[in-house]
Image (tube, grey):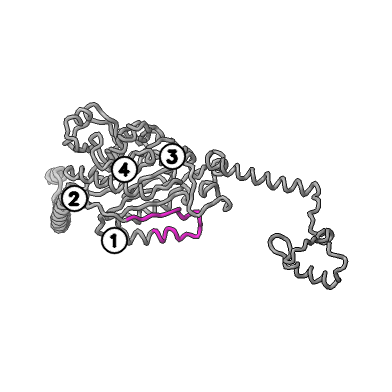
């Protein structure tokens, strides 16, 4: 308290300047001071009611629970929102922005295993197509894409253009732009990847070069590299299936993805045939790379070098394997399955987990096979199911070989020669017919003249006969008349006797 003798002005001055108090709370003059107790009563904390106390407790408790859940979700993935709600497959913990981080993505690969009804579970498919000088076939391929019945928004497309000398890349870009310009969102496809990579493939794309025996090993290994590059660049954690499709497939069911998926196999292929001209039989098995292993082939493999690659359909390798193509029955059950060891690459549907597990297309001799056949052998080695459908058929485009072209040229020459012979024969027949027609007409005229002459002769003869008969009758009549007159003039014997007697 201030001394009582201090004036009010002095007390006000001290209150305003605080006596110049230092850090120890004493004034510079050394005197003690105190602040009235009622001066800061308004700053004293007020007592809180029960609601305020509960709200504060609730806030602190909620914060503690949230922090605990956050820690648990980091170390226990099964309680994350993406695991509780499978539809939330992207983002750190789901689609809620509150749980997303810009540079972190969480994928639960247990939800992309692939099932028999993937179109109902919205399972994504990666459709892969390696291309080389494929411009002539691309329009047909894109027409097949548009006709697929599997939801297009669940199909991602991936193309690899390599070692091409034509306008494959330019045409592909134009066709993709037209494909995605669709007023119906359901008609557009998902993510589309176009990759360009050359592998030094020098084998020509004509049928004779591609399917010649000498080029098979190197060509298969190069194709395996292209497939592996394409797959590794395009496969996403969201893909459940991978579908490989050649661009030169001419005819295939629009429901092929659903049809193959319904079997729920790790790797599955259809049967592949090709149409032929009637003079070649009308149709023919095409893909001989889908087969079952045989003892003869295993014995053959043991005799080959380490880097050798067995290819089917060539006399150099007599494997005597049961081929999927040769078991086709046009009236058989299309859902009938056949376990196989090698697979052809025209049309392959495989679960993405097969590739994630390490199966690939060997660009080297794996058990004396490479590319798709090696892929089938590797998948079998890793205990995946590999099946083919002998009675479910798709049709490859017919491409005539050199022998076919030579045979067609020979047939064309024969046809022209035959047509020339037939034309000459026809001309001869027409000439003979014309000559015969002229002779016949002359003969008819002569015949008619003969008939006329015969009629004239007969008429003349008839006239002469009539005249002769008339003359005979006249002679007879005249003779009769002469006799009658002679009789009248000379008397009869009786009368003569009478006359003589009288005399």
Specify few, some or many for label 2: CA neighbours under 10 Å numbering under 14, 14-19, or 20 or more.
few
**CB atoms at circles 4 and 1 under 8 Å apart?**
no
| Whole-number angstrom distance, CA of label 3 to CA of label 2 | 39 Å
Left/right placement of residue 283 relative to residue 7 reads left
The part of the chain drawn in magenta is 176-195
Residue 178 lies in the magenta stretch: yes
Is residue 362 visible in the rendered image? The answer is yes
Left/right placement of residue 191 relative to residue 500 reads right
- The first of marks 3 and 2 along the sequence is 3
Query: According to the image, label 2 marks what residue?
Result: 405
Query: According to the image, label 4 marks what residue?
Result: 345
Q: Which mark is residue 261?
A: 3
Count of residue discs: 4
Q: Quadrant of residue 442?
A: bottom left
Query: According to the image, label 1 marks what residue?
Result: 167
Q: Quadrant of residue 193?
A: bottom left
Instruction: Decide which of 167, 449 is in the foreground and name it.
Output: 167
Which tag is nearer the camera, tag 2 or tag 4?
4
Asked which secondary structure carries label 3, the reply is: helix
Instruction: Decide which of 18, 345 is in the foreground and name it.
Output: 18
């Amino acid at each position: 308290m201030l001394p009582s003798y201090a004036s009010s002005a002095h007390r006000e001055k001290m209150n305003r300047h605080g006596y110049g108090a230092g850090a120890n709370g004493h004034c510079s003059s050394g005197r003690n001071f105190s602040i009235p107790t009622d001066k800061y009563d308004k700053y004293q904390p007020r007592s809180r009611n029960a609601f305020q106390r509960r709200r504060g407790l609730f806030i602190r408790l909620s914060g503690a629970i949230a922090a605990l859940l956050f820690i648990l979700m980091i170390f226990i993935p099964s309680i994350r929102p993406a695991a509780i709600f499978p539809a939330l497959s992207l983002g750190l913990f789901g689609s809620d922005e509150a749980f997303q981080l810009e540079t972190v993505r969480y994928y639960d690969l247990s939800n992309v295993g692939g099932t028999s009804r993937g179109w109902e579970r919205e399972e994504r498919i990666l459709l892969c197509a390696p291309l080389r000088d494929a411009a002539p076939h691309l329009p047909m391929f894109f027409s097949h894409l548009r006709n697929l019945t599997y939801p297009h928004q669940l199909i991602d497309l991936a193309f690899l253009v390599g070692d091409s000398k034509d306008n494959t890349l330019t045409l592909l870009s134009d066709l993709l732009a037209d494909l995605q310009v669709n007023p119906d969102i359901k008609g557009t496809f998902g993510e589309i990847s176009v990759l360009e990579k050359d592998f030094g493939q020098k084998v020509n794309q004509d049928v004779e070069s591609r399917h010649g025996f000498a080029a098979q090993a190197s060509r298969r290994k190069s194709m395996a590299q292209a497939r592996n590059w394409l797959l590794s660049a395009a496969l996403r954690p969201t893909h459940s299936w991978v579908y490989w499709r050649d661009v030169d497939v001419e005819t295939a069911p629009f429901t092929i993805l659903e049809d193959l998926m319904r079997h729920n196999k790790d790797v599955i292929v259809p049967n592949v045939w090709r149409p032929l001209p009637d003079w070649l039989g009308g149709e023919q098995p095409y893909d001989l790379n889908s087969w079952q292993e045989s003892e003869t082939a295993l014995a053959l493999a043991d005799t080959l070098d380490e880097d050798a690659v067995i290819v089917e359909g060539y006399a150099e390798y007599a494997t005597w394997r049961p081929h999927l193509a040769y078991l086709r029955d046009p009236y058989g059950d299309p859902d009938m399955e056949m376990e196989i060891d090698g697979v052809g690459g025209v049309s392959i549907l495989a679960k993405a987990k097969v590739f994630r597990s390490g199966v690939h297309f060997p660009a080297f001799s794996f058990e004396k096979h490479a590319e798709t056949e090696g892929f089938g052998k590797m998948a079998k080695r890793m205990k995946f199911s590999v099946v083919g459908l002998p009675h479910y058929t798709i049709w490859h485009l017919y491409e005539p070989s050199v022998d076919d072209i030579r045979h067609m040229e020979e047939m064309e020459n024969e046809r022209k020669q035959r047509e020339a012979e037939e034309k000459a024969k026809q001309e001869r027949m027409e000439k003979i017919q014309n000559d015969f027609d002229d002779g016949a007409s002359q003969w008819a005229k002569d015949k008619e003249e003969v008939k006329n002459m015969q009629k004239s002769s007969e008429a003349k003869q008839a006239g002469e006969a009539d005249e002769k008969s008339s003359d005979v009758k006249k002679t007879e009549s005249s003779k009769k008349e002469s006799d009658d007159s002679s009789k009248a003039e000379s008397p009869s014997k009786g009368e003569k006797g009478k006359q003589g007697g009288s005399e």
